Image: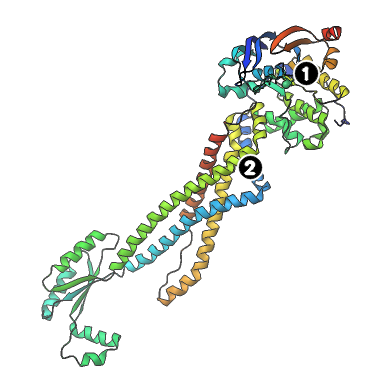
Amino acid sequence: MKRNTRKPRPRAVETEARSRPAQQPRGKINAYFTHHLWVLVSSLGQLWRTPFSTLMTTAVIGIALALPAGLHVLLNNVQQLSSGWDDSAQVSLFIKQGVPEERIRSLADKLRDWDGVAEVRYISREQALAEFRELSGFGDALDSLAENPLPAVLVLRPTLTQAEPVPMEQLLERLRQLDAVDQAQLDMEWVRRLNGIIEVGKRGALLLGALLAMAILLVVGNTIRLTIYARREEIIITKLIGATNAFIRRPFLYTGFWYGLMGAIVAWLLVAVFLGLLSAPVSRLSSLYDSQFRLGGLDFITSLSLLLSGIFLGLVGSWLAVGRHLQAIEPT
Amino acid sequence: MIQFDNVSKRYPGGHEALSGVSFHIQPGEMAFLTGHSGAGKSSLLKLIALIERSSRGQVFVDGQNLSRLKGRHIPHLRRKIGIVFQSHNLLFDRTVFDNVALPLIIAGYHQSEVGRRVRAALDKVGLLNRDKAYPITLSGGEQQRVGIARAVVNRPPLLLADEPTGNLDPELSREIMGLFEEFNRVGVSVLIATHDHDLISRLDHRLLTLSGGRLVRDGRTGELAASA
Ligand SMILES: Nc1ncnc2c1ncn2[C@@H]1O[C@H](COP(=O)(O)OP(=O)(O)OP(=O)(O)O)[C@@H](O)[C@H]1O
Ligand SMILES: [Mg+2]
């Protein structure tokens, strides 16, 4: 054994040492918060010292969070888009052949008084034919017909929105029972189907989110478990000098907190980049459709819930690992 | 300070490391514990710090019956005991200062108080100027002294040491023992397990001798020289 160069230089020890250590050290509350802050910072430092494994874990958490979050944002966008179309929903009433014009006009007047009908426009058979001729370019073919094949149409714009689908259904039913009406057709039926599909998609995103949340718990739990075993010696020593379980648990919980927070930030960036990459082609596409639609990004609420769920999952994952593995480490 | 009443310790393997041990160490007393390898010295110290629990009999520390002490109260017992370990010593990824500060941080002392006490403890063991060093850069003797500083920084009423001079040369060993005597002089109860007879025969303290897990002699260290 190497001889040390400095000799112990014993000093008179203060007689204070005889008295019991202060049970209630000064400024204990203050010291408690200082300690928490210190652990918070030092657990981040610990992660910084193993950048590769930290990055790996953070990336896994980030991707797992980004998938449901990105899906959620996309579905919200599609819903936004289709709710714009909702307003332009209209009902076309095809009038039976041979119904005289006055009856159609009085029917239109009657319909204007109905609940849920905002506007009624009358398109006579002649107007319909003219419109068709203009739009289709089949003018010559039409000329060869002896009689106008097109029915008169009443176009209704309902005040009801798609958000209240049952009254719309009722309105259609009432319109179909009218004598003069051959057919009542909701032009934007497919919007409602799309909304249904979006609802299914959202439910799917939720389920996917639940599955991935479990995956995150496992990833964080396993990472913390490895950290616990890597710091086994430290845990034993601190237990031997009187650390409570809460004290020993703390740095691992904060580590989980950091993993969750950093994972959420990575997820946020991934979704933002993803949306950024999509936004240019989406704008181009919507301008082709004469639409003002622009892809919406991560709003404040979504961002906040992303961060909070990341932190929550990080904390719970580390809590589970700590609960299982810390008890097993005892000094011998 | 420490009281053993007919204490036995049987390890799960069935081996009885201690059998029917009784003794009483008064507050402020200093005692050595000796015996052949495997005699049960470390086991006895572990019972005091509740690293192990006795199989039979009762252990009292500072008036507390340890067999009745619940798990969640163990940390508070250990804060009353400064332990210098045979193995498990320092945290090698932290500075000397941080190692010595650990018991104070655990007990929730204020930052300024921590600095003051750590410096006082390091001063006592003559390492005040090495506070920013990492343990790996210190010699074996210096590391041992850091361990002692950590054990006393909280000013515990009881100090336990298991082979504190285990692999140190005679001169350094004497200095370390001098440190313990000094803590004892200010009222700390001290119990040291060692098999270094040469070293302790020159001192005058109580000596407990274990053999095969039994307490075979309870006398003074001076008797060692006489019997040798
Ligand atoms: N955890 C354990 N499980 C089973 N047996 C143990 C355990 N610890 C110690 N023993 C046994 O108990 C007996 C006493 O061991 P102990 O460590 O107390 O001896 P010691 O006097 O400290 O010896 P040494 O001088 O070598 O350190 C030994 O026979 C040892 O094998
Ligand atoms: Mg031993």
Above or below, A161 against B175 in this view is: below
Q: Chain of mark 2?
A: A
Residue, x 31% and y 70% (percent of image)?
A: A88
Q: Quadrant of the C terminus of chain B?
A: top right
State the residue position of label 1.
B194
Q: Position of residue A282 (x, y in %)?
A: 46, 70
Q: Give a yes or no on whether discs 2 and 1 share a subunit.
A: no
Residue, x 17% and y 87% (percent of image)?
A: A148
B27 or A56, nearer to the observer: A56
Q: Position of residue A180 (x, y in %)?
A: 12, 74
> Which dot, 2 or 1, sits closer to the camera?
1
Q: Tell me the amino acid under the disc marked 2.
A: Ser
Mark number displayed over residue A43: 2
Place residue A205 in its image quadrant. Answer: bottom left
B14 or A63, nearer to the observer: B14
Q: Tell me the amino acid under the disc marked 1.
A: Thr
Residue A89 left/right relative to B36: left
Mark number displayed over residue A331: none
Residue B164 left/right relative to A235: right
Q: Position of residue A33 (x, y in %)?
A: 60, 36
